[in-house]
Amino acid sequence: MQSNQITPGINFTDLLLHNHPQAMAWVTGNAANPQLSGLVKFYQTSYVGVLVEAEIFGLPEKEEPKIGSFYGMHIHQFGDCSDNFSNVGTHYNPEQEPHPYHAGDLLPLLGNQGYAWSAFYTKRFSIKEIIGKSVIIHANPDDFTTQPSGNSGTMIGCGEIRRIL
């Protein structure tokens, strides 16, 4: 491959640097994690799929800082983060697939000293489909096996996905 060839990664970097997301979730922590906050942004790509960028602060430390800690991240059915996130429903799963093939099953976050940044590309959903749903951060990593939702533990952060005009 020639070094001047445009790749999807180059397009994704340009999208993150020079464009606005079409949807976003402002994530806040539960009562036990009030320091947790951050943004999860959703960008439409020219490749039909969606580029997801997450930047989360104030994650609870579980291990030594130089090792880092993994946290589950999913899209849930409903955007109602009230009542300690008890109204968000289950993972967004319009095709009724087993875990980890739900449309709302996302990559885990790797937190270091309470901070995590991640970006990835997915074709599991369109931006239109996730408006009004929620992004949930879980206390534990998703094991990608346990049914129905990966044994990722307590919901520690929640944010409603909203369209950005």
Image (cartoon, rainbow, N blue to C red):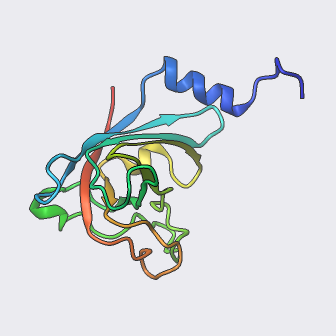
Residue 161 figure quarter? top left
In this rendering, the answer to whether 160 lies above or below 5 is: below
Q: Position of residue 52 (x, y in %)?
A: 48, 42
Which one is in front, 121 or 93?
121
Q: For the image shown, how many numbered marks are present on the structure?
A: 0
Location of the C terminus (image quadrant): top left
Q: Is residue 116 visible?
A: yes
Identify the residue at image location x=55%, y=44%. Answer: 120
Q: Position of residue 72 (x, y in %)?
A: 40, 61
Q: For the view shown, which residue lies furthest in the bottom direction?
A: 147
Tell me: 54 left or right of 158.
right
Which one is in front, 107 or 76?
107
Tell me: 3 left or right of 37.
right
Identify the residue at image location x=59%, y=26%. Answer: 13
Which one is in front, 73 or 160?
73
Q: Position of residue 17 (x, y in %)?
A: 50, 20
In this rendering, the answer to whether 45 lies above or below 125 is: above
Q: Position of residue 44 (x, y in %)?
A: 52, 35
Location of the N terminus (image quadrant): top right
Identify the residue at image location x=32%, y=61%. Answer: 62
Identify the residue at image location x=45%, y=68%. Answer: 142
